[in-house]
Amino acid sequence: MRRDGGTATETEQEVREPTRPEGPTDLRLVPLAAAAWAAAACAVGVTGWWTVAGVAVCLVGAAVLSAWGVVRRRGDPAKSRGAVVPGVATGRRLRATAWAGVLLCAAAGAASAGLHAADLRRGPVPVLAEEYARARLEVTVTSDPRLTRPKVRGNTMAPVSVVLNGEVTRVERSDGAVHRTRAPVLLIVPPGEGREEWLRLLPSTRLRIGGRLAPPSHPGEPFAAVLKADGSGPPRIVGRPNASQRTAGELRAGLRRATEGLDPDARALLPGLVVGDTSRVGPELRDAFEATDLTHLLAVSGSNLTIVLLLLIGRPGRAHQVERGGLAPRLGLSLRVTGVAGGGLTLAFVIVCRPDPSVLRAAACGLVALLAIGTGRRRSLIPALAAAVLVLVLYDPWLARSYGFLLSVLATGALLTIAPRWSDGLRRRGVPGRLAEALAAALAAQAVCAPVVVVFAARVSLVAIPANLFAELAVAPATVCGFGALALAALWMPAAEGLAWVAGWPVGWIAWVARTGSALPGAELAWPGGWWGGLALALLTVTVVLGARRLPYRGVVGVLVAGLLLLAVVRPVPLSRWATGWPPPDWVFAMCQVGQGDATVLAAGGDSAVVVDAGPDPVPVDRCLRELGVRRVPLLVLTHFHTDHVAGLPGVLRGRSVGAIQTTGLEEPPAQAAFVRRTAAAARVPVVRAEPGELRRVGDLEWRVLWPWPAAGRVAEDGGLFEGPNDASVALLVRAAGGLSLLLLGDLEPPAQRALSRVHPGLAPVDVLKVAHHGSAHQDPALMRVVRPRLALVSAGRDNPYGHPSPRTLAALRDGGARVLRTDRDGAIAVVGAGRGLVAVPKGG
């Protein structure tokens, strides 16, 4: 009661309530959640009877431990004397009860996983999948459509298909039998004219599809079958999406329209940052985010929700105070009303971002992090996180094997436990409060998540922590403005476009951080993959953290380590040459290590070089050119349009001035030829055709086009015309500084090699031969006898499925007196000197 007889207001009660100090971390729910998680992860990948046996064993064990605990309680001497003194028997009883709870949660996790997995084996869909049968089906869409990432398979690019999750509700077999069922499937739509209509589909839309069913490619996947749709026309819709999905779809479409006028990176990233819509994010930008460990910004994350909800409560630790910040006190909202408003925002977040498991996971982790930030009691939120994990795993056991779920839980747990302690330690050493908290959060998240990333990616990002710190500066304004544009797009599009324009500045900063970080020569460090590699990195991390705490001069050592790490990441060319000996000074020719493909470099003086082929991936060719110090490319020659020679084109163009791109006249495969022209046009680089016999010169570098020759097919032994991209490869005879001679044969096959010898009877021995077609067995022995190289270089991928290079080809080259080097074992190779001073310097496999 108030002194004047009135009732105390809720605000006054809040003022009087003291802030309770945070006690020790409560970990009692952690083993329960971990048990359910581990049991579910095991159960979704085994047969039903094994799951039943596991559940039975857990239940029996829990019953035995519970009974033993009851017996120990009755026999507790302290209890029998009426004393309430904890003794040995009491401790054992508590431990028995705790282990019984762990076994019960394990049984619950395994049972939930077993029931979900059993659903995948029910009904006609899995039976038809085992038979690879065709059927007509009604499918309800359960996810947003997405495009597969382009992948290089040999010398071709796998087609980009539309993929979406669905649930089969009706099956009509080829014999006319009709079945009603409910079976989740992965729907794959081949490329074609109807792609845009497929990509506009909303969850809950019902389709009628004809196609072939197949079993999932890996056990433990949450699908009863993979459905490959017939044809490539537009989808046949038989049922509209529900109202909530239509509303969410309209909001998301409005945000995409509002971002149309932004720069390409901002246009692609803003919808992904706000609602997880990554349909515009290209492979190159995605690779940059992966290299800097910023991919959490491309998915629906708990941080999205946390940032928006912080608008209600302001900065950390003030939610229980009357002076709390944010919009809530300015609007006169009490704590209860603030909680209800936060719940409403969370519900809207889930609806707009789709109520699928990944969004529910993000909402749960985001709310836990919000409670920790709002109340200032981080350690006491560990039970809340454990409870969220337990509920989510029981609700959707497939999360137990989800890479994203594991990273989310680890990152949230690190922010609740490790980050506060490290932040306090940094403050004690004079680091400003906000910077200390941000740095501690980035260090803690990276320390616990990096071992998991290594398991699947086999690499460690050396720029992840600074990249996350710099990107974090822009995440909050970009998210807030993005959600504002999302809301305004449904009411007033000009205002939404203006707010999206404002959001484009911080989003552009995030993209710049990702691109700049990924472009550094030492951005990523190769590390053994798999669980052993992850365990090794975890042990190394623990050793470094414990060792750093015991160092007498941590500040000095920290500065020294940071300086060494900076040098390792930036890798100045002079320092890199001094430390590794590669590339050697005055190199003339280099063969990059790009996997199963070709990319070679001819020095043209200074920082200029002529590049021949770009390999199958932009990242390794870009890294190779950076190590070589190449900034200007007067000419890029693409010998033919196979993917393993042209797919890395964006890597050559990245950050370099390219004068022109020269190609062969046979534009096959058409898709790859179109890719080259499209990429060149975007970079404003002209594309020219290699003319037979043409002679070019750049500085001391001179080359002549030997192949393809006009009507060369007429000189073939069988009198026929050459067909296929390999035989249309551009072949060059190069004269470099010091008189070094090189013959670059592209992927010429034996008929074309024989024809080349016939139309150029004056061919003489050369110093260096770039062996055709990655050293395959298909070589013309007569040509090798004519050119008699002193040095034969083979570009091939490690453990490639084609057996390249062929032992027969290698033996023939060695028998001819050539020294043979290969990128799959020797790594990148540089050639120095000429004549008697000819030296090949491998970087190391």
Image (spheres, rainbow, N blue to C red):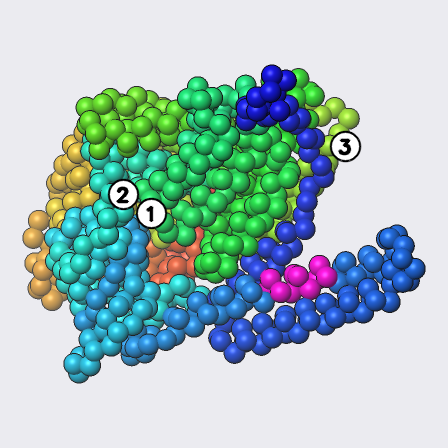
User: Considering depth in this image, is 325 or 302 the residue closer to the camera?
Assistant: 325
Are discs 1 and 2 less than 8 Å apart at CB? yes
Residue 364 is marked as: none
CA neighbours of label 2 inside 10 A, class few (<14), some (14 to 19), many (20+): many
Foreground mark, 2 or 3? Answer: 2
> In the rendered structure, which disc, 1 or 3, sits on the residue that comes first in sequence?
1
Q: Is residue 173 magenta?
A: no
The residue that appears at 33% across and 76% down in the rendered structure is 123
Residue 550 is marked as: 3
Instruction: Decide if residue 147 is in sight here.
Output: no
Structural distance between the alpha carbons of marks 1 and 2: 8 Å
Identify the amino acid type marked 2: Ala
Structural distance between the alpha carbons of marks 2 and 3: 53 Å
Quadrant location of the N terminus in the rendered image: top right
> In the rendered structure, which disc, 1 or 2, sits on the residue that comes first in sequence?
2
What kind of element bears circle 3?
helix
From what the image shows, is residue 348 above or below residue 229? above
Residue 527 rendering spot, x and y as whole percentages: 54, 47
Total numbered circles:
3
Question: Residue 302 lies in what quarter of the image?
Answer: top left
Q: Is residue 105 magenta?
A: yes
Task: Identify the residue under disc 1.
Answer: 354
In the picture, measured across the screen, residue 238 lies left or right of residue 552, that is left
Residue 248 is marked as: 2
Instruction: Decide if residue 491 is in sight here.
Output: yes
User: Considering depth in this image, is 726 or 277 the residue closer to the camera?
Assistant: 277
> In the rendered structure, which disc, 2 or 3, sits on the residue that comes first in sequence?
2
Which residues are the magenta region? 97-106
